[in-house]
Amino acid sequence: MQLQQKINRITDILRRDDGISGAMHYTEQISWILFLKFLDDFEEEKQDEAQLNGTEYKRVIAEEYQWKKWACPKDSEGEFDIKNAKTGKDLTSFVYSNLFPYLKSFKENILDRKSLKYKIGNIFEFLDNKVASGHTLREVLDIIDSLNFQSQTELFELSQVYENLLQGMGNDGGNSGEFYTPRPVVKAMINCLDIQPGESIYDGAAGSCGFLIEAFEHIKEKYNGKLSTEQWRFLHEDTFYGNEKTPLAYIMGMMNMILHGIESPNLYKQNTLTANIRDIQEKDRYNIILANPPFGGKEKPQIQQNFPIASNATELLFLQHFMKSLKQEGKAAIVVPEGVLFQTGNAFAKVKQELLENFNLHTILSLPAGVFLPYSGVKTNIIFFDRKGSTSEIWYYECVPPQKLTKNKPVQNEHLAEFVELFTKRSETQNSWLVKADTLVGNSYDISAKNPNNNTKVIHLAPTDIIDNIKQNDAKITLLLNEVESILKEGYDE
């Protein structure tokens, strides 16, 4: 049975359990079990390597909590030891009373925040076993025990399958969109930034860490076999940084990064917006910032006090945070809702004024509606800016797929291929054009994409005008219905 088939089998088993409700629950529960099996194989491999090198490797997990002891014990022949395998209430009791308290304690008295032990403690601090039946859990453990994460092929396949699980959570709708940004969008952003080894990369709204992981894969592929020992260490320990305030998203992100091979991710469970951006110094900043921050939320006055330009719009606060967190010569690509570009209210205008005057906002990619379906229908853009002087000219590109995007017809790599190809050339085409920055100042800093090659003019009306239009349309519809009704009556009378 292939890995994807095994995971599908596990999700079917978990759906029958009384403690599991929906994609978020079963993904969370599969995650911690997969992670512990991965961790056991990882430590086994480290132990074998140490033995070959004549050194010693001290395992992070104590023997009684190792996979082969509690999850799927083996006899002297290496076969499954039925006699000593826990199941039913014995299994759930051990997991609840012994295993989880042990793993949660890993953060205690540890000064080295980069250590694997500390990262494990971070993960399990916010996790609990929700599988109610010990017999269900036994079925799941037996399937996962058949996986071998010492195999690079299987480990790669695991990372792909895990991405599918996270995408499934996004497709589940509701608030699950925080876990997943469509990979074609992520890839396009990273391909444009030309990330170099030795650069620090930050996402202040990390979710499942898709941006950080894709950046890791990009560097590995581009510099395969060319990284020095120090560059490789830096890549694993000092390259990737992120914050995530939601416990489940934080857990998923941390495990996602480790399962993809980033051994020591610098991911922290905290609300990025609680930091006063006035305190951010150059040493606290990053070379690369990639993010799709939450939008549409409202922040309390005490949070707004952390920003020179106060606003209750979450997206505006995140944008200020990212601007302040970018190193000199640094590069950023941020997803923002359309409203950030066209709104000209006091706070929006001031933030965009600072962006144009103190940063080089060189590119705006207008994404088509439907990119973030099913969990958000808001039209979005990606802004690319550097901390290299002020903005003189903005290159716009309007992404126009051949068909309307839906949940079942999502954005594809080919939809963004032309944008990536033209990014450095800044060519003017049917879908791309250049705008001088000084023409935007007298326009109250409306920097929304208005394709001069498109005859269809988009007008953003005030809410009161929209309501008036609706009333007028309703009146016209009522009039037409009355006419139709009158004609029908006349027909009956005849």
Image: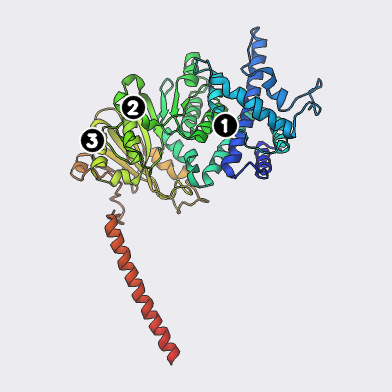
- The residue located at (69%, 18%) in the rendering is 63
Q: Earlier in the sequence, mark 3 or mark 1?
A: 1
Residue lying farthest bottom? 494
Mark 2 in CB contact with mark 3 (< 8 angstroms)? no
Q: Secondary structure at mark 1?
A: loop
**125 is higher (above) or lower (below) than 112:** below
- CA separation in Å, label 2 and label 3: 19 Å
Q: Nearer the viewer, residue 278 or 379?
A: 278
- The residue located at (54%, 41%) in the rendering is 167
What amino acid is at disc 2?
Answer: Leu
345 vs 125, left or right, is left
Q: Which mark is residue 392?
A: 3
Residue lying farthest left? 442
Q: Which residue is mark 2?
A: 326
- CA separation in Å, label 3 and label 1: 49 Å
Q: Quadrant of residue 382?
A: top left
Q: Earlier in the sequence, mark 2 or mark 3?
A: 2
- Residue 383, image x, y percentages: 34, 38
Q: Nearer the viewer, residue 436 or 335?
A: 335
What amino acid is at disc 3?
Answer: Ser
Q: Quadrant of the C terminus?
A: bottom left
Q: Which mark is residue 127?
A: 1
- Residue 76, image x, y percentages: 81, 20
351 vs 89, left or right, is left
Q: Residues within 10 Å of mark 2 (few under 14, many from 20)?
A: many
- Residue 473, image x, y percentages: 33, 67
What amino acid is at disc 1?
Answer: Leu
Mark 3 in CB contact with mark 1 (< 8 angstroms)? no
